[in-house]
Image: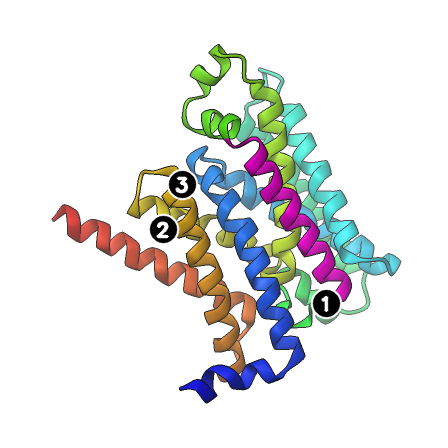
């Protein structure tokens, strides 16, 4: 049993991938709780798609992919926020138009590239290929996201749970909303390295949704979500090592299985 657990750790790229999965899992799971409570899951899904043109542009220009993804996602988040401030355009309309326009632009740009195979990791992630520069950026994003959530915990909690009361006591709702969008943009960029643009939204939502089924207390929800995401990261990487599976898909699959188990537990308690 110990040999089965320790063998993969003999490889540097596996140790790096495990560390990256912990950092990404922490970021996605903690922020994901607020995303689920505020019912912003569709925003996370939209932002993951909007990263594609930035990734392709960075690839074609020969610069760091994270820079391109971050630029595209932040631009989209700001666009959604600004457009939906107009009462004549509902937020779900902005979410439907802006990211899909960005995604289609990314597909068009991919069609001009020499090889779709070179760009496949953008869609499905490559956590086993994380290098020092990517790890540094993931770590910086983790510190920023978790630091801001801790610093403005009360304001974000009120915004997600009782926005009317938050507005009454003077919490700047618009600023908190823009802040969450920007944190979501940063988290999406980190998640793309692990599971790609296709599956990042699942990594954001599944652990938090599972925790939501098990408790109504916010702090417990955060801890459970974090535990699920980090454990899924380890399980996914070990599955990819021993079974030759896609690491990103394996991580998300484990998260999905955990959600189904939590749903069954909730259902049996009600029966």
Who is closer to the viewer here, 28 or 97? 28
10 Å crowding of disc 2: few (<14), some (14-19), many (20+): many
Left or right, 212 with respect to 170, comes to left
Residue at the (58%, 15%) spot, across then down: 87
Who is closer to the viewer here, 20 or 182? 20
**Tag 1 or tag 3, which sits nearer the N-term?**
1
- Element under disc 3: helix
Segment colored magenta: 131-153
Which quadrant of the figure contains the N terminus? bottom left
Q: Which residue is mark 1?
A: 116
Q: Position of residue 20 (x, y in %)?
A: 61, 63
Who is closer to the viewer here, 41 or 1? 1
Q: Which residue is mark 2?
A: 210
When the figure is inspected, residue 151 is found, relative to residue 83, above or below; the finding is below
When the figure is inspected, residue 173 is found, relative to residue 252, above or below; the finding is above
- Element under disc 2: helix
Q: Position of residue 119 (x, y in %)?
A: 72, 65
10 Å crowding of disc 1: few (<14), some (14-19), many (20+): few
* Total number of numbered discs in the rendering: 3
Residue at the (35%, 44%) spot, across then down: 212
């Amino acid at each position: 049993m110990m040999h089965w657990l320790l063998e993969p750790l003999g490889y540097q790229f596996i140790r790096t991938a495990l560390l990256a999965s912990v950092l990404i899992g922490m970021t996605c799971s903690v922020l994901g709780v607020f995303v689920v409570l505020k019912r912003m899951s569709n925003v996370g899904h939209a932002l993951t798609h909007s990263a594609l043109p930035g990734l392709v542009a960075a690839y074609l220009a020969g610069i760091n992919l994270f820079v391109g993804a971050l630029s595209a996602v932040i631009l989209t988040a700001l666009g959604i926020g600004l457009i939906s401030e107009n009462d004549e355009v509902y937020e779900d309309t902005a979410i439907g138009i802006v990211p899909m326009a960005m995604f289609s632009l990314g597909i068009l740009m991919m069609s001009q590239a020499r090889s779709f195979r070179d760009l496949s990791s953008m869609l499905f992630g490559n956590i086993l290929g994380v290098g020092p520069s990517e790890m540094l950026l993931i770590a910086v994003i983790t510190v920023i996201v978790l630091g801001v959530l801790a610093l403005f915990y009360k304001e974000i909690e009120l915004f997600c749970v009782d926005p009317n009361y938050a507005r009454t006591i003077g919490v700047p709702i618009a600023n908190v909303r823009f802040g969450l969008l920007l944190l979501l943009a940063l988290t999406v960029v980190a998640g793309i390295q692990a599971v790609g643009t296709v599956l990042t939204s699942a990594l954001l939502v599944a652990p938090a949704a599972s925790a939501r089924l098990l408790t109504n207390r916010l702090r417990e929800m955060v801890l459970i979500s974090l535990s699920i995401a980090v454990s899924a990261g380890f399980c996914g990487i070990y599955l990819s090592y021993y079974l030759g599976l896609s690491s990103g898909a394996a991580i998300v699959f484990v998260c999905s299985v955990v959600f189904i188990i939590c749903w069954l537990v909730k259902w049996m308690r009600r029966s």
